[in-house]
Amino acid sequence: MRYKVNIKKTEEGYSIWVPGLPGCWSQGKTEEESLENIKYAIKEYLETVEKLSEDKESRYVEVGDNA
């Protein structure tokens, strides 16, 4: 899976967040470190969302040009 991330250089290093996953953000001293850290943050975010919705009735939908 691929996610678009936004990255911003700060005085402390780099802030990075996922616009499509509200509240999913991380940071790092270097751009490379922040990119590695956001991968972990995305994984943890998605696992948490799955746990919070396991007792809920759910459906999946396809989104795209042919959907």
Image: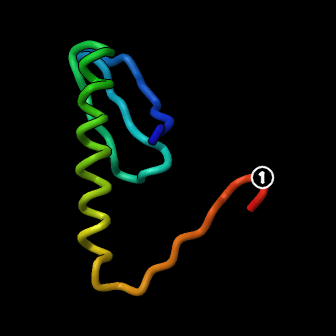
Q: Is 27 or 52 nearer to us in this picture?
A: 52
Image position of 50 (left or right of 7): left
Name the quadrant of the C terminus: bottom right
For image coordinates 28% across by 53% down, the residue present is 45
Tell me residue 26's x, y (percent).
27, 35
Of all residues shown, which one is farthest toward the right?
66
Q: Which residue is mark 1?
A: 65
Does 1 appear above or below 45?
above
- Number of marks: 1
Q: Is 29 or 33 nearer to us in this picture?
A: 33
Does 31 appear above or below 43?
above
Secondary structure at badge 1 equals loop
Name the quadrant of the N terminus: top left
How dense is the environment of label 1, judged by Cα within 10 Å: few (below 14), some, or many (20 and up)? few
Does 41 appear above or below 38?
below
Callout 1 amino acid: Asp
For image coordinates 78% across by 52% down, the residue present is 65
Tell me residue 47's x, y (percent).
25, 58
Tell me residue 24's x, y (percent).
33, 47
For image coordinates 24% across by 70% down, the residue present is 51
Q: Is 66 or 44 nearer to us in this picture?
A: 66
Does 37 appear above or below 52?
above
For image coordinates 49% across by 49% down, the residue present is 20
Tell me residue 11's x, y (percent).
27, 15
Q: Quadrant of residue 53?
A: bottom left
Image position of 62 (left or right of 22): right
Q: How is the image coloured?
A: rainbow
